[in-house]
Amino acid sequence: MIQKAPGTNAWIQTDQSVSTPSEVLSVAITRYHHDVITIGRDALDRFDARERDIRSVTMGLSPEAYRAAKDRLETFWKELLAYCAGQSSPSRVYQLNLQLFPLSKKQRGNR
């Protein structure tokens, strides 16, 4: 996101956002996810509700509905990244974590 400006001690922005794919295999990226999830948890206490948006939902899904939800998240993610890339003068850095994972064991007969 930043690099040192040539010939100076100043830092300049190089990328507007940093994004990881939905299915990560890298140990470094897994560690990054651990770290930003912790930062997100701490944001509940660090920021007033007007400065953050943290929400959750617990839902029952079939394997097909899970795949459809995951596809919808991917579409939203791409749209959001395109929107953010078009911002001409950002004034603050934000972190967005989207998490979709099972809370229960598979039922018999489900893939």
Image: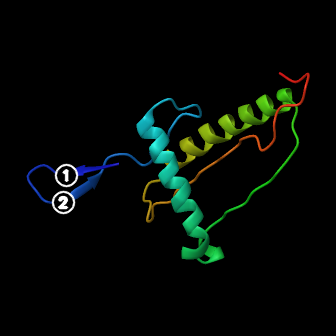
Which residue sits furthest right?
Answer: 109
Question: Which residue is depicted at the point 70% across and 39% down?
Answer: 73
Q: Quadrant of residue 42?
A: bottom right
Label 1 neighbour load within 10 Å: few <14, some 14-19, many 20+:
few
User: Which residue matches tag 1?
Assistant: 4
How does the figure colour the protein chain or chains? rainbow
Position of residue 109 in the picture relative to residue 42 (left or right): right
Q: Which residue is more in the foreground, 66 or 83?
A: 66
Q: Residue at x 11, y 57 (%)?
A: 8
> In the image, residue 57 lies at what x, y percent?
80, 54
Instruction: Identify the mark at residue 87; answer none if there is no mark.
Output: none
57 or 109, nearer to the observer: 109
Q: Label 2 sits on what residue type?
A: Ala
Residue at mark 2 to residue at mark 1: CA–CA distance: 6 Å
Pinpoint residue 7: horizontal percent, then vertical percent.
Answer: 8, 52
Tag 2–tag 1 contact (CB < 8 Å): yes
Q: Quadrant of residue 11?
A: bottom left
- Using the image as rendered, state which of residue 1 and residue 59 is in the foreground: 59
| Element type where label 1 sits in the image | strand
Q: Quadrant of residue 27?
A: top left
Q: Which residue is mark 2?
A: 10
Position of the C terminus by quadrant: top right
Asked if 103 appears above or below 26 in the picture, the reply is below
Depth check: give the residue in front, 49 or 5. Answer: 49
Q: Amino acid at mark 1?
A: Lys
